[in-house]
Image (cartoon, rainbow, N blue to C red):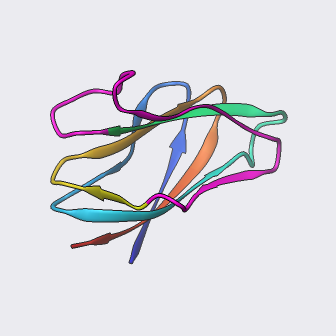
């Protein structure tokens, strides 16, 4: 398994992009820098597509100040150049655990 860390901001951007086939096993979204609650959105985006209503998997999830939201029940199998994209109402940290297959 490997880890990737990134900042999530108000702009929708990749938090993980698959190189080859991979499985995302856990995603952590940490509100450790904002002074109040934030909300975030997450999309599972097929290669060549963009984040939109069709591929949104979490919408307006609230994370309290100093708290972490863990996505660990769903295991996402991603193909080459598929991605997880996110944005938030403030700055939060994302850590993605994945394995190539």
- Where is residue 97, by image quadrant? bottom left
* Left or right: 35 as drawn, with respect to 7: right
Does residue 64 belong to the magenta stretch?
yes
In the rendered image, residue 61, in percent from the top left (x then y), is placed at 65, 35
In the image, is residue 45 above or below residue 19? above
> Magenta residues, as a range?
45-74
Whether 16 is among the magenta residues is: no
Q: Is residue 38 left or right of residue 99?
A: right
Is residue 93 shown above or below 74? Answer: above
Q: Residue 95: percent from the left, percent from the top?
A: 53, 58
**Front residue (pair 77, 18):** 77
Q: Residue at x 26, y 64 (%)?
A: 22
Give 35 or 81, whichever is nearer the viewer. Answer: 81
* In the depicted structure, whether residue 53 falls above or below residue 78: above
Using residue 52 as the reference point, say whether residue 37 is left or right of it.
right
Residue at coordinates 80% horizontally, 34% vertically from top-left? 37
């Amino acid at each position: 398994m490997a880890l990737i860390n990134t900042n999530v901001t108000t702009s929708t951007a990749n938090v993980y992009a698959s190189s080859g086939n991979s499985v995302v096993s856990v995603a952590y979204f940490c509100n450790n820098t904002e002074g109040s609650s934030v909300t975030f959105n997450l999309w599972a985006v097929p290669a060549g597509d963009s984040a939109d209503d069709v591929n949104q998997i979490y919408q307006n999830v609230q994370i309290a100040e100093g708290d972490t939201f863990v996505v660990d029940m769903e295991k996402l199998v991603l193909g080459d150049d598929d991605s997880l994209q996110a944005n938030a109402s403030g700055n939060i940290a994302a850590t993605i655990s994945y394995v190539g297959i």
